[in-house]
């Protein structure tokens, strides 16, 4: 009599339900797409290109953001603990910081069409980001000691309020934009300094090197906010700083991507788009700076959607959630 074979273990199928493991890493490429659309909006005024390009990008990105935001909110609404679980890991902190900043960028998109709604959305996004910064700080302090080091992601969390300056300028409050600009210089400077010191003492792991591109974003945003608030001299100084950071990143490009494509490549998207927007905004289509800004905008148009597509392609089937250790409801 032949012995019966043991039955195979039961398959663990994913739990049904909308958004149970939506990864926060989706929001960094969305942030890049918002930046790209705002760059083309600036190009319409500076170069006279059709505003339809920027409107199309911003409209499509707004829909994508609202859908992804709803998909993510479905997770903590089912199990609130998933929010703090996502904040325990670096991709989660980066992604959730980008999510609240996308809310601010959405307000900038709406400002020319619905100033009242954009103002309310800006205040809401600002409050959300304040709460998020408190939660991130608690997660870092309660986490392991090796996780309490300064990373480029700190810019998204602690300096991200500067995007409120873009909204303030768009809504006609340049004095608020100036206040945000000067108040964000200190945390940005501390993060830049701490990161430079770390680079001199130890080499970042290859998978985390794309995050270094985030250092470009604050300098580019400072340029745009200063230019919009009428501070021309500081705007040119910040643009020079942004250019120096970009040159360092371009020179180190092969070293930055040596680990191959990963969801952390989303960190390349917004800084590149913001740099292009900064030069286009500051130059207003005049001089050599406008040419460099135009080239950077074309480069961003090629790179940002490609990276966003590659990241979003990993979302179905749970690959992106697994790669970024996203919490599950």
Image (cartoon, rainbow, N blue to C red):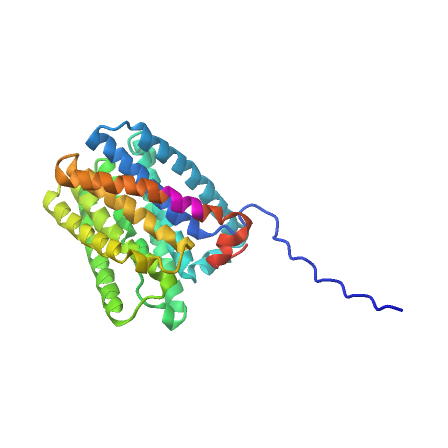
Q: Which of the 4 image quarters holds residue 195?
A: bottom left
Decide: is 223 above or below 89. Answer: above
* One can see residue 246 in this view: yes
Closer to us: 300 or 129: 300
Query: Seen from this angle, which residue lies furthest left?
Result: 233
Across and down, in percent, residue 205 comes to 36, 66
- Return the x and y of residue 181 as percentages of the image width and height: 20, 49
Name the residue: 28% across, 27% down: 50
Vertical arrangement, residue 195 with respect to residue 221, above or below: below
Residue 261 relative to residue 116: left or right: right
Number of callouts in the render?
0
Task: Identify the residue shown where x is 19% and y is 42%.
Answer: 292
Q: Quick check: is 307 in the magenta stretch? A: yes
Depicted 292 relative to depicted 208: above or below: above
Query: Where on the picture, by quarter, is residue 300?
Result: top left
Range of magenta residues: 305-310
Foreground residue among 97 and 30: 30
Is 131 one of the magenta-colored residues? no
- Predominant secondary structure, magenta span: helix
Q: Is residue 259 left or right of residue 271?
A: right
Q: Quadrant of the C terminus?
A: bottom right
Report if residue 103 is visible in the image.
no
Q: From the image, which quarter does the N terminus lie in?
A: bottom right
Q: Residue furthest right?
A: 1
Compared with residue 156, is residue 46 higher up or lower down, i.e. above or below? above
Residue at 17%, 46% (x, y): give it.
178
State the image coordinates of residue 190 (x, y, percent, origin top left).
22, 62
Q: Position of residue 284 (x, y in %)?
A: 16, 35
Residue in view at x 32 percent, y 36 percent:
109
* Image side of residue 11 versus residue 241, left or right: right
């Amino acid at each position: 009599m032949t012995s019966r074979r043991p039955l195979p273990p039961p398959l663990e199928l994913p739990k049904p339900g909308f958004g149970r493991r939506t990864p926060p890493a989706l929001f960094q490429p969305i942030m890049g797409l918002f930046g790209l659309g705002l760059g083309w909006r600036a190009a319409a005024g500076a170069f006279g290109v059709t505003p339809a390009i920027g409107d199309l990008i911003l409209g499509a990105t707004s829909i994508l953001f609202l859908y992804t935001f709803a998909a993510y909110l479905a997770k903590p609404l089912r199990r609130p603990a998933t929010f703090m679980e996502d904040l325990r890991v670096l991709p989660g902190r980066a992604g959730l910081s980008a999510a609240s900043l996308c809310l601010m960028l959405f307000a900038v998109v709406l400002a020319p069409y619905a100033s009242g709604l954009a103002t309310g959305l800006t205040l809401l996004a600002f409050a959300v980001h304040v709460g998020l910064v408190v939660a991130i700080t608690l997660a870092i302090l309660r986490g392991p000691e090796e996780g309490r080091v300064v990373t480029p992601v700190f810019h998204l969390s602690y300096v991200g309020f500067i995007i409120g300056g873009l909204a303030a300028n768009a809504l006609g409050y340049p004095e608020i934009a100036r206040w945000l600009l000067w108040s964000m210089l200190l945390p940005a400077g501390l993060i830049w300094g701490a990161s430079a010191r770390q680079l001199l003492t130890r080499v970042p792991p290859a998978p985390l090197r794309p995050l270094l591109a985030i250092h470009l974003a604050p300098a580019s945003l400072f340029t745009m906010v200063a230019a919009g608030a009428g501070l021309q001299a500081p705007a040119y100084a910040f643009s020079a700083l942004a250019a120096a950071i970009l040159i360092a990143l371009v020179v180190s490009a092969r070293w930055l991507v040596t680990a191959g494509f990963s969801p952390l490549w989303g960190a390349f998207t917004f800084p590149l788009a913001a740099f292009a927007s900064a030069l286009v905004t500051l130059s207003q289509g005049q001089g050599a700076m406008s040419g460099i800004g135009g080239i950077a905008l074309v480069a961003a148009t090629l790179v940002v959607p490609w990276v966003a597509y590659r990241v979003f392609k990993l979302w179905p089937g749970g690959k992106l959630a697994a790669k970024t250790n996203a919490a599950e409801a």
